[in-house]
Amino acid sequence: MNKKVLAVFLTLALCVSLLSGLSFAAEDTENAEVQVNVTIANAGELVLVNQSVAVTDVDGDGALTVFDVLAIAHSEYYEAADAAEEADGEEETESADYGFAVSDEGFITKLWGVENGGSYGYYLNHAAAMSITDPVADGDYLAAFAYADLEAWSDMYTYFENTAVSCEPEAELELKLSGAGYDESWNPVVLAVSGAKILVNGEETAFVTDENGAVTVTFAEEGTYIVSASSDELTLVPPVCVVTAVKKDAEEPDDAEDGETGGEPSETPEFVDISGHWGEAAVKYVVEKGYMKGVSDTEFAPDMGLDRASIVTVLYRMEGEPEVTVENPFADVPADTWYTNAILWAAENELVLGYEGQFRPTAALTRSEAAVILYRWAQFKGFELAEAADLSKYDDVAAVEDWAAEAMAWACGEGMITGTSESTISPQQSLTRAQLALMLMRFLEA
């Protein structure tokens, strides 16, 4: 961050840290850095979309927080900040507009240049954050917004299961739109958002969510699409899912490795999007082993979310892509797709069971689901299993469903999965390509 920008935010942050009444551990965060994806909306209009931000402790309070994320996001991407930084020889003044401000009490008073009397919201991993001093962790997703309805404040925060996914052109992609709400006792609940119109790159489409908030969309051509939604009945904080439609190479490796895991070792392509990324070493590891591939010759898309078909495709590739003999048990897995044989192989070896005859290949892959599939795969391979970890130290352990509890405890015991913070394990959070690469490297190199 530019020193001029840092000075402005340090002044704001000092007020927040002095008046918040919170104490922070004396942890040295001077060199700490995490990656957080950020979306910002103003009055229903997206102004920053799922942008990866390298977060450091800009205010020196000993923690990486929501404040740090928003401060850095504004300093790097807000237009007025860019213009101010480009002024040659101009001295910094208090009047410089960086689009973001907080009060002495720690409340946002300006977001992306909008001052609306304090009507702002922000959600961390789709859960309402308590304050801008809430801690953030690597891989978190932060959405901040200025309210559109300044009278009834009826804006509903909405989100898709995943903020980034990939699919093949013309393939059916399943999405589910949920909203944050409250029950009659003001307890937070998740609501299905029905009747919402799907927007692609800001334009309305014919796709509409059903009574469960579900919708199936398709993309005719390769490319990157920003999927959002609007409603005639509700004031939506626009959800975001960045979809990369790309043809995937499902050809069988020429020379699969012998040994416990298959794959095709190869020289790592010069991916332009992994340099300096926290998962760079893991990405290089899985690509060199032939376990994972880029979404193109130049991009790996480390922060792109994974779907359920992708993880079994990786394991199938690691196994050397053996012949499949089992009959297709899933009604939603068509023949001759890039993932068909992988899913059938996984079903044949009981790595996946599906639900009511469905596999949901394009649904977002959660941390729990990844743990279960990898746990069954480790058993299938005959690997020695680590002792299960105690998950009771996590405040959200109740969110770990019974079917995933044993696998999550094992994955934590193996060190494949760590908490998203000191007190959370986030079992329902979606998994990215870089996170899967890191899980595999941790397990196979242990």
Image: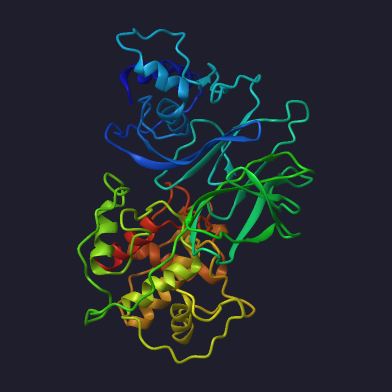
* Residue 417 visible from this viewpoint: no
Q: Nearer the viewer, residue 120 or 78?
A: 78
Residue drawn at (46%, 87%) of the image: 348
| Percent of width and height locating residue 221 | 51, 59
| Percent of width and height locating residue 217 | 62, 60
Q: Residue furthest front?
A: 221
Residue drawn at (27%, 35%) of the image: 31
| Percent of width and height locating residue 75 | 41, 25
Reply above or below: 192 against 46: below
Position of residue 381 in the picture relative to residue 258 (left or right): right
Residue drawn at (55%, 25%) of the image: 111
Position of residue 107 in the picture relative to residue 60 (left or right): right
Reply above or below: 405 against 61: below
Residue drawn at (43%, 69%) of the image: 311
Reply above or below: 140 against 339: above
| Percent of width and height locating residue 235 | 73, 39
Q: Nearer the viewer, residue 151 or 327?
A: 327
Tell me the quadrant of the picture where the N terminus can be found.
top left
Tell me the quadrant of the picture where the C terminus can be found.
bottom left
Q: How many marks?
A: 0
- Please say which color scheme the image uses: rainbow
* Residue 405 visible from this viewpoint: yes
Quarter of image, res 248? bottom left
